[in-house]
Amino acid sequence: MPDSPVESAAELALVREQLDRQTAALRRLEDADRALVQIVLTGGTLGELCERVVSFLDPTSRAAAMVTTTDGRVVVRAGAPDELARAEALPCFDRSGRFVVESEPMGPRDDGADADRAAVRIIAGQLDHGVILAFTSHRNLTEDDVRLLERAATVAALAITKDQAVAAVESKYRAEFLRDALSGRAGTPIDAVSHAASLGWDIDRPMVVVVAETDEDDDRTERDRDEIRFLQQRFARAWTHAVGVRDPSSPVVGFSREVVALIAVPASADTERVMRTVGDLVRVVRGDGGGGRRSFSAGVSRTITSPEQLPQAYDEALSAVSVGRQMQGDGALAHVDGLGIYRLLALIPDGADLRRFVRESLGELATDDQPEYADLRQTLSILIDTNMNVAETARLLFFHYNTLRYRIGKLEKMLGPFTSDPELRLTLALALKVHQMRGL
């Protein structure tokens, strides 16, 4: 039986409504394309791009947008303060403020508790440049919204690629100058300060040199050279971002194997205060360890007051990061003044010589063949640290006085009369320090 005229009219109206909706969606995307591309063509920023995304998502600004790095560090954000605060309080951000890229889905989402946000990768060719995010507080994001975000991601990739090309040229000159300054070839202090100022840096103030190195040995890795170079660039950008938020005029440069930063500190700052400042930066760069971040160690120099002291400070920071890793393992953060005798021991190039010295000095105690050997080494170490003060050592180890006396007798049978021989005590003290060093 043929449809009635009323049913045919209703179906026609429904088809027309669907076509109108699709046409409106396409027009919205085309308008967004033109507006977003125009931002890039006129030299606009990612911040302006995010602002335009917010305006397309909701003309009343009840939305927020962000761009993050590949590992989730927020680079730019746009939206009303209350919308941004609401977004940043969502569980998709960790305690350090990093977007948890490794667990958040990309693209459209099913309706649910997390449908008020969407994330799209920013990809140019084979390179992943980060993520663009959108948040709304009053509705769920639709597939059309995600398509808009995908268009924005494409435009963001163009903007980032352009910015990186410009930054690469600028970075080359910055790196060359800082390398000259760290090697003492930057001219007089007045010349160095003037040249640094032309690059937007202030080095005419008290500073410490910080050297950060990834703990992975890139010479023995299975990664290809392009991936290593990309990871090192990302590591340098992480430091640049973290330091730039605190002080945009502090120099930060990524070299092939390390990142070097000159961090301003108060002239009267002691080592503890300096390490708190650097430690805060390290925590920002490290985040919660997610997003594909590589473990790294950092070394800190003494405070300097003139650019002509940079070569010495750089050497100190290099020693601190190298010896600090041997003392503390991967992820070390060390100040040169905290290295003590380890700094001298690290100058011995052959680790085999040091291992042989430990075996010859400590004998069986150089091994962990018996469970008690580690305890005996600790007892010996504290005895030497307290200058053979038996009562103080017993108190620190929570031993009875007679128990400690028994242990001392056992140690002297194994090692010799160290309680009465200062030369032997010195040898044992050095052997214990070497034993504590890692990576030998």
Image (spheres, helix red, strand yellow):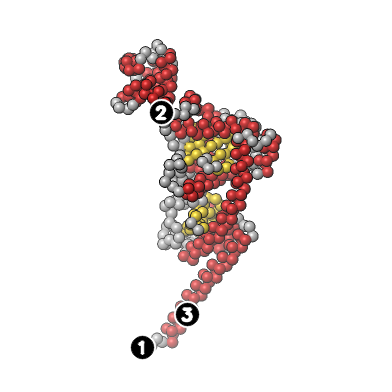
Amino acid type at image mark 1: Met
Amino acid type at image mark 3: Ala
Determine which of the numbered discs, if any, sits on residue 13 in the image.
3
**Residue 43 position within the rendered picture, expressed as x and y whole percent measured from the top left:** 63, 57
Q: Which residue is rendered at x = 59% and y = 37% of the image? A: 262
Up-down: is 218 above or below 128? above
**Residue 199 position within the rendered picture, expressed as x and y whole percent measured from the top left:** 65, 44
For the residues marked 2 and 1, what is the alpha-carbon distance in whole angstroms?
97 Å
Nearer to us: label 2 or label 1 = 2
Up-down: is 229 above or below 325? below
Secondary structure at numbered mark 1:
loop
Q: Which residue is rendered at x = 53% and y = 54% of the image? A: 67
**Residue 433 position within the rendered picture, expressed as x and y whole percent measured from the top left:** 43, 25
Circle 3 packing at 10 Å, graded few (<14), some (14-19), many (20+), is few
CB under 8 Å between discs 3 and 2: no
In the rendered view of the protein, which quadrant contains the C terminus? Answer: top left
- Can I make out residue 419 in this image? yes
Residue 192: quadrant of the picture: top right
Nearer to us: label 3 or label 2 = 2
Circle 1 packing at 10 Å, graded few (<14), some (14-19), many (20+), is few
Q: Which residue is rendered at x = 45% and y = 41% of the image? A: 219
Up-down: is 313 above or below 46? above
Secondary structure at numbered mark 2:
helix
Amino acid type at image mark 2: Ala
Pointer 1: what residue? 1
Residue 267: quadrant of the picture: top right
Q: Which residue is rendered at x = 37% and y = 21% of the image? A: 360
Circle 2 packing at 10 Å, graded few (<14), some (14-19), many (20+), is few
Q: Earlier in the sequence, mark 2 or mark 1?
A: 1
Pointer 2: what residue? 352
